[in-house]
Image (cartoon, helix red, strand yellow):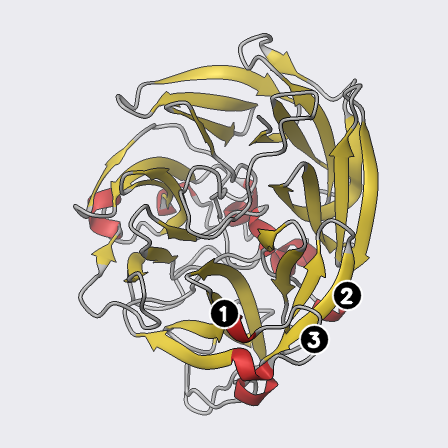
């Protein structure tokens, strides 16, 4: 179980980049020329309790069956851990165990699936989320090197790097959480490209094994994409600056959230992000509340006038809030951790037990309300699909796995279908 603790770093995570209208393309639904309307991935816990088997199948009518097992599905990963991303007609596994590797799967006309490419990225160590810019360009990073890897998601070939060595903060003394403490790991979490600027969230770590951060601030790297040559191994001139905010910490989500994102751009072009102030051992890492902060359209600094304290409107003080599922019109879904649901006698309760409940928040009005009383395992059920006025929410309890279908206008919910394993749903058409 030690392996589980070390790999599931910043998340009881939960957010898929599905419904947000962005100025730059992000992870998007799969192409229309494939067979099925949806892809369903079931993630089944392995016999060792720390790794998983992933099964992939196509669906058309979400109301056709009450249960989807794995008997007719394609096994796309055995005894491993991975984020899952859909982009441009393919499904990408961003594997971080047993090795760091990105694997591409595509659906054939007959509905079967074929592995069509792979990319070894062991130099990154424990990688960040992937950002897909276009059919020929994607970005991923990790604490192994002070560089952002550029690759072609069509050919699955590395094409270049963005080198930020000159501004690296590795070994910088921050005096947090104690005097003399320094940054021992500089970990990119996720990134967003907006207005040709890349915003890269970071977790700066002091003691990885004990889930201790080296800063109580939100830290971000700014990169000017107009100066990036995707075929260059340098691109250091594109690095603009680091920015930090005192309003929160723990910015973004590692790939361990299954591919979830904590950074979203709304219809106005404003970038919102959660500082969840939570990591690894089921306890807050600073005295700051979970909060949403913002970078306004056209800006490269945090907005000094925006701060949304999530712990009060969501459910109450000391209830850490994770994830940022953007549903549109300033409304987003977040997962609220109930500390009373964490078993204090079980060090793995944070990872293994249902401890989170879904809430809707309004980023503009700074209000929130609970959607469901059902507790779910956060990182094990992390990706919401918004489609045609409905939210399809994966729920993983102690006894079953299923999708909760929710009407966005009324927030009325119903149980849709059960699955064999923690489910993830991707819209294809």
Residue drawn at the location 26% of the way across and 51% of the way down: 310
Q: Which mark lies nearer to you, 2 or 3?
A: 3
**Sequence-wise first label, 2 or 3:** 2
**Please, what secondary structure does the residue beneath circle 2 have?**
helix
Rounded to the nearest whole Å, what is the CA distance between mark 2 and mark 1? Answer: 19 Å
Where residue 407 appears, x then y in whole percent? 34, 21
Residue designated by label 1: 203
- Check disc 3: other Cα within 10 Å, few if <14, some if 14-19, many if 20+: some
Quarter of the image for residue 112 reads top right
Task: Residue 376: give x, y in percent of width and height.
Answer: 47, 34
User: Which of disc 1 and disc 2 is earlier in sequence?
Assistant: 2
Q: Earlier in the sequence, mark 3 or mark 1?
A: 1
Please tell me which residue lies in front, 355 or 109.
109
Q: Quadrant of the C terminus?
A: top right
Q: Secondary structure at mark 1?
A: strand
Instruction: Determine if residue 279 is in view.
Output: no
Horizontal arrangement in the rendering, residue 341 relative to residue 132 (left or right): left
Residue 98 location, x and y as percent?
Answer: 78, 54
Q: Nearer the viewer, residue 97 or 41?
A: 41
Please report the residue visible at 33 percent of the width from the left and 48 percent of the height from the top. Answer: 266
Q: Name the front one of labels 3 and 1.
A: 3
Label 3 belongs to which residue?
A: 232
The kind of secondary structure element at disc 3 is loop
> How busy is the neighbourhood of tag 1: few (under 14 within 10 Å), some, or many (20 plus)?
many
Count of numbered tags: 3
Give the residue number, with chain letter if any, for mark 2.
122
Mark 2 to mark 3 CA distance (whole Å): 20 Å
Is 292 on the left-hand or right-hand side of 43? Answer: left
Q: Nearer the viewer, residue 399 or 31?
A: 31
């Amino acid at each position: 179980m030690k392996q589980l603790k070390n790999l599931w770093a910043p998340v009881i995570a939960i957010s898929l980049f599905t419904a947000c209208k962005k100025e730059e393309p992000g992870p998007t639904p799969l192409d229309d020329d494939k067979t099925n309307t949806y892809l369903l991935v079931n993630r089944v816990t392995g016999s060792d309790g720390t790794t998983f088997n992933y099964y992939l199948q196509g669906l058309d009518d979400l109301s056709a069956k009450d249960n989807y097992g794995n008997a007719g599905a394609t096994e796309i990963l055995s005894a491993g851990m991975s984020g899952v991303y859909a982009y441009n007609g393919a499904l990408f596994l961003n594997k971080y165990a047993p090795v760091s590797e990105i694997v591409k799967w595509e659906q054939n006309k007959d509905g079967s699936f074929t592995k069509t490419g792979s990319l070894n990225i062991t130099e990154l160590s424990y990688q960040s989320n992937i950002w897909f810019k276009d059919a020929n360009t994607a970005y991923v990073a990790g604490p192994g090197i002070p560089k952002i890897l550029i690759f072609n998601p069509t050919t699955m070939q590395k094409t270049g790097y963005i080198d930020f060595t000159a501004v690296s903060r590795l070994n910088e003394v921050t005096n947090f959480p104690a005097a003399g403490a320094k940054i021992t790991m500089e970990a990119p979490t996720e990134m967003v490209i907006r207005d040709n600027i890349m915003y890269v969230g970071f977790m700066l770590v002091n003691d990885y094994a004990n889930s201790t951060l080296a800063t109580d601030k939100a830290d971000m790297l700014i990169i000017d994409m107009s100066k990036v040559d995707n075929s260059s191994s340098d691109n250091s001139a594109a690095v603009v600056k680091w920015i930090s905010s005192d309003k929160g910490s723990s910015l973004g989500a590692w790939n361990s959230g299954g591919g979830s994102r904590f950074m979203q751009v709304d219809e106005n072009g404003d970038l919102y992000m959660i500082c969840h102030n939570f990591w690894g051992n089921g306890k807050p890492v600073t005295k700051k509340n979970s909060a949403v902060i913002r970078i306004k359209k056209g800006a490269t600094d945090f907005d000094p006038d925006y701060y949304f304290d999530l712990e009060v409107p969501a459910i109450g003080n000391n209830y850490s809030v994770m994830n940022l599922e953007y549903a549109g019109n300033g409304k987003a879904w977040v997962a609220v951790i109930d500390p009373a649901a964490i078993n204090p006698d079980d060090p793995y309760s944070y990872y293994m037990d249902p401890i989170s409940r879904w809430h809707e928040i309004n980023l503009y009005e700074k209000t929130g309300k609970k959607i469901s009383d059902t507790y779910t395992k956060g990182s094990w059920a992390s990706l919401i699909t918004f489609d045609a006025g409905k939210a399809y929410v994966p729920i993983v309890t102690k006894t079953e796995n299923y999708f909760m279908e929710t009407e966005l206008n009324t927030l009325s919910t119903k149980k849709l279908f059960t699955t064999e394993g923690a489910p993830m749903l991707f819209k294809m058409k």
